[in-house]
Image (cartoon, rainbow, N blue to C red):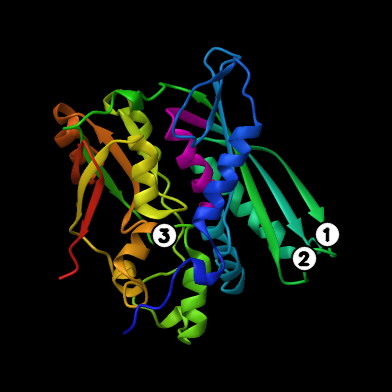
């Protein structure tokens, strides 16, 4: 099959997003009480002891399918994970969660979603402390709604990403699926190829894995990368900060093999997690123990030069 699909053809331009992010950075002047954290996954506010960590994110267009198929618990997991996993990437322990719902009108589905959100937040030792709901029929139609999450935690250990050096080891933590990334492209493939979610040999809508177990290993970690927008390549660039890497993806899960029927490997690397939702960078001394304790895979190592990723699909 001709690999004709790209993320850009589905209406999402990652480069345009990066340009807008750079524009925002050029306009924002951070006060002295914002602790420098180069990966940008979350913001550290040095105004208390310990410092506060906060971030905000949403689910994206995966929510449309979750609404359609009644997968509200998975939507709740996605919303939490997109924030929780970002907080831990800067060495934070998530504690409090706030939600924002934008709807056409408040309906029973929103009551159910909040119940499930509360249940899933509690499982992680967090609290759903507040929220806001806005009925905006001029923006949302009767079937559509959107939700954003806001997460606050405390800094346990600022991860020393600036100490990452050639020879350090890159570990991949398996994902539960596509997580909450690349769904404009996935939805386009489903529509154009007339594919039903139910006929796929894997659970397409599985909720994003929440990597709460990583918190207890912060002392052995140099850097963490939550694989979100921009896929595995962008996550590597974010945590490596200009350094290179040699990475081999040897375990290609069913959902990635499926999408590779429709997109090139190069496009997949720029869009999807390739089977790994979080990356750990550590030194050789801790690599084996970490990969065993967290049930993860050693993917490669840091080098001088470019980032090279090999995907073994045979």
Badge 3 crowding class, 10 Å Cα cut-off, few under 14, some 14 to 19, many 20 or more, is many
* Residue 202 rendering spot, x and y as whole percentages: 35, 72
Is residue 179 in view?
yes
Q: Position of residue 267 (x, y in %)?
A: 37, 64
The residue under label 2 is: 140
**Mark 1, residues whose alpha carbon is within 10 Å: few (<14), some, or many (≥20)?**
some
Res. 96 in view: no
Main secondary structure of the magenta stretch: helix
In the image, is 186 to the left or to the right of 43?
A: left
Q: Secondary structure at mark 1?
A: loop
Which numbered disc covers residue 271?
3
Question: Disc 1 vs disc 3: which is toward the camera?
Answer: 3
Secondary element at tag 3: helix
For the record, the magenta segment spans 77-94
For marks 3 and 2, give the CA distance.
Answer: 27 Å
Between 292 and 185, the one nearer to me in the picture: 185
Kindly identify the residue that appears in the image at 35 percent across and 52 percent down. 232
- Foreground pick, 161 / 295: 161
* Marking on residue 77: none
- Residue, disc 1: 136
* Cα separation between marks 1 and 3: 32 Å
**Whole-percent x and y of residue 35?**
52, 20
Tell me the distance, in whole angstroms, between the alpha carbons under discs 1 and 2: 6 Å
């Amino acid at each position: 099959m001709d690999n004709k699909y790209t993320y850009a053809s589905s209406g999402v331009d990652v480069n345009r997003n990066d340009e807008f992010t750079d524009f925002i950075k050029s306009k924002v002047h951070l006060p002295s009480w914002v602790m420098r954290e180069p990966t940008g996954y979350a913001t550290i506010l040095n105004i208390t002891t310990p410092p506060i960590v906060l971030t905000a994110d949403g689910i994206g267009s995966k929510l449309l399918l979750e609404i359609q198929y009644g997968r509200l618990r998975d939507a709740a997991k996605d919303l939490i994970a997109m924030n929780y996993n970002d907080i831990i990437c800067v060495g934070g322990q998530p504690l409090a969660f706030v939600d924002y719902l934008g709807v056409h009108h408040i309906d029973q589905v929103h009551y159910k979603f909040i119940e499930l959100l509360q249940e899933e937040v509690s499982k992680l030792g967090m609290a759903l402390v507040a929220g806001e709901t806005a009925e905006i029929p001029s923006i949302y139609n009767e079937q559509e709604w959107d939700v954003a999450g806001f997460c606050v935690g405390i800094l346990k250990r600022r991860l020393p990403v600036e100490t990452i050096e050639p020879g350090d080891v890159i570990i991949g933590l398996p994902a539960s699926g596509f997580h909450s990334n690349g769904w404009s492209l996935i939805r386009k493939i489903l529509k154009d190829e007339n594919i039903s979610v139910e006929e796929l040999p894997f659970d397409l809508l599985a909720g994003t894995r929440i990597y709460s177990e990583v918190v207890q290993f912060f002392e052995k970690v140099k850097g963490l990368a939550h694989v979100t927008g921009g896929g595995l390549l962008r996550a590597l660039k974010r945590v490596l900060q200009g350094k290179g890497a040699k990475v081999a993806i040897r375990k290609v899960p069913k959902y990635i093999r499926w999408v590779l029927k429709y997109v090139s490997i190069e496009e997949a690397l720029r869009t999807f997690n390739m089977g790994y939702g979080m990356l750990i960078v550590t030194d050789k001394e801790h690599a084996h123990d970490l990969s065993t304790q967290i049930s993860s895979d050693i993917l490669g190592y840091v080098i001088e030069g470019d980032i090279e990723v090999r995907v073994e699909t045979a």
